[in-house]
Image: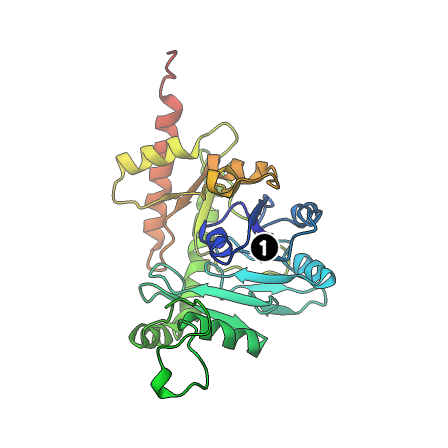
Amino acid sequence: HVLVPAFTCAACADAIVHAGGLPIPIDCDMDSYGISLDAVRRGLEDKDVVGVVLAPCYGVPARDGNEIISLCKERGLWVCEDACETYGAHMGLKDGGKVPVGTLATLTVVSVRSEKMIGVGEGGAILGNDSMLVARAKWWCSRAPSRGAGLWRVYEHDAVGQNFRLPEMLAAIGCASAEMLPTMIERKRRIHQWYAEAFANHPVLKDIRLQKEAPGDESVWWINAALLPEGMSGEEVGMRLMKDFPDIEIRPGFFPLNMMKIFKSKWSHPCPNSEVLYRRLVCLPSSHQLLHEDVDRICSALVAAIQTVGSTPVSSA
């Protein structure tokens, strides 16, 4: 059994199933949207748990990430960090220092899908401090070939692997794109500040919440997720915004894994925070190419959508 965030991409749980395990979705905190320490502790009451997937959300380090990693080390459990949305961010340590997200986990994965912080089209990378594990992952991603068998037995395999190698051309593009990562992070942080200022200064938007980073953390704000006030539906506002402003690309929050039939089991946990986020979140455009006037227009469109939804009569059917 492996504990996974309920509020994340289903790929985290898919990988566990493909490896022969059972994903157990657990709840998140309402600040960073990462899995909470309390949820992990409850999940570890299941003595069959062997590891935890930590998936910082939308570019913000998990609020309880340090404590969760420490707890797992105490229990002898591995931690796989899905840093696909958050690489480039830093977590603050108790001693006042900082470490890049992903450096404390047993293994870490990052994505280079086109919309991520470094985008090449499709693919990713595996990082880790254990050279044996990294080598084994590379071997398995190369279809697990037999080692030391000689060139004439090149089609012999020691295990059932996968062909997950990143093409060298895409890797070259990624290396070049990585040079722009500091600039990308700087722009993402500036865009987040523009959203925060716009929300604070508009009466319709002032009750909308953005994620909160823990003291000492440094987020990259990959996406700016707007948590609408209680009683307001993210789906209704989002669908109205897409209909009235089709050139503004938005997306919903993650559909909670605990609500998907494919991941339900007798070990499932209630995840009320994750369900709240799905019901009330609207993820706003956050491309590093946005200008201040673009953010102003997006916020004006969000205001119009909220007002339209609020003035629409409710059917009494």
Q: How many marks?
A: 1
Q: Amino acid at mark 1?
A: Ala
Answer left or right for 199 relative to 294: right
Q: Is residue 92 above or below residue 252?
A: below
Quarter of the image for residue 139 reads bottom left
71 or 231: nearer the viewer:
71
Q: Position of residue 84 (x, y in %)?
A: 46, 60
Quarter of the image for residue 177 reads bottom left
Which residue of the protein is positioned furthest toward the right in this rendering?
74
- Locate the C terminus and report the quarter of the image it occupies: top left
Q: Could one spot residue 287 in this view of the protein?
A: yes
Q: Is residue 158 above or below residue 316?
A: below
- How busy is the neighbourhood of tag 1: few (under 14 within 10 Å), some, or many (20 plus)? many
Which color mode does the image show?
rainbow
Q: Position of residue 85 (x, y in %)?
A: 46, 58
Q: Is residue 311 above or below residue 183?
A: above
Residue drawn at point x = 31 percent, y = 64 percent:
121
Q: Position of residue 2 (x, y in %)?
A: 59, 53
Residue drawn at point x = 37 percent, y = 15 percent:
315
46 or 148: nearer the viewer:
148
Kindly state the secondary structure of the residue where label 1 is placed.
loop
44 or 136: nearer the viewer:
136
Q: Position of residue 261 (x, y in %)?
A: 47, 38
Q: Could one spot residue 218 in this view of the protein?
A: no
Q: Is residue 31 above or below residue 301?
A: below
Which residue of the protein is positioned furthest toward the top in this rendering?
316
Residue drawn at point x = 63 percent, y = 48 percent:
36
Answer left or right for 62 relative to 179: right
Answer left or right for 49 relative to 287: right
**Which residue bears the numbered disc 1?**
62
